[in-house]
Image: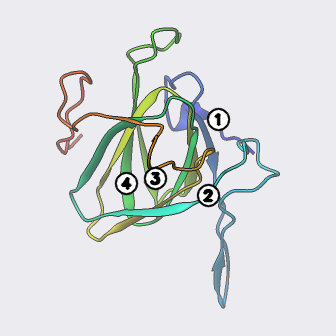
Amino acid sequence: MTRDLTAVLPEPIHGVRVERLRPIPDERGRLMELYSSLSDLYVGFAHSYLTTAYPGVTKAWHLHREQVDTMVAIHGMVKLVLFDGRSDSPTQGRLNEIFMGTHDPMLVQVPCGVFHGFKCISEHEALVINFPSRPYLRDDPDEIRIPADSPTIPYDWSRRDR
């Protein structure tokens, strides 16, 4: 079931969807379904992959023209940041921060055209699984990349103690 975004994002970017994941523990360990065809977020996927980041490492920015990314942090914690640079979007120019991982398991879906990146904010390596809607084509990748400190996106990746 898609989670009410206002608990995570007071002003969500248009098209971003979030689903709370539910670990099911017992005395043997736990099980947690990550992505299902029964989910409200299901758009299909072409493959899945694991990406990791060491503590303090930022992996940003990129967007896809046609691909939808559906991701979950399965170990550690990440700060996933989204920026809506779409000129035709009602939320153009909006930034969203989502803290996800071991302490708050969730599936986040990033629509086409939204820049995104993440930073490992845990004391150990963070593991993120992505279920992209399209296969990766080495000769024609569906992505635009810019540096994490690009002036195109008004965001500072520095830690902020609130």
Q: CA distance from mark 1 to mark 2?
A: 27 Å
Q: Please, what is the three-letter code of the amino acid marked with disc 1? A: Asp
From the image, tell me which residue sits under label 4: 78
Q: Nearer the viewer, mark 4 or mark 1?
A: 4
Residue drawn at 18 percent across, 23 percent down: 151
Residue drawn at 63 percent across, 51 percent down: 20
Q: Quadrant of the N terminus?
A: top right
Residue drawn at 52 percent across, 26 percent down: 12
Which picture quadrant has residue 120?
Answer: bottom left
From the image, tell me which residue sits under label 1: 4
Q: Residues within 10 Å of mark 4 (few under 14, many from 20)?
A: many
Q: CA distance from mark 2 to mark 3?
A: 22 Å
From the image, tell me which residue sits under label 3: 100
Q: Nearer the viewer, mark 2 or mark 3?
A: 2
**Mark 3 or mark 1: which comes first in sequence?**
1
The label on residue 47 is 2
| Mark 4–mark 3 CB contact (< 8 Å) | yes
The label on residue 101 is none
Q: Please, what is the three-letter code of the amino acid marked with disc 2? A: His
Residue 61 drawn at (x, y percent): 31, 38
Q: Please, what is the three-letter code of the amino acid marked with disc 3? A: Met
Q: CA distance from mark 4 to mark 3?
A: 6 Å
Q: Please, what is the three-letter code of the amino acid marked with disc 4? A: Val
Q: CA distance from mark 4 to mark 1?
A: 20 Å
135 over 114 or under it: above or below: below
Residue 32 drawn at (x, y percent): 66, 68
Residue 84 drawn at (x, y percent): 43, 22
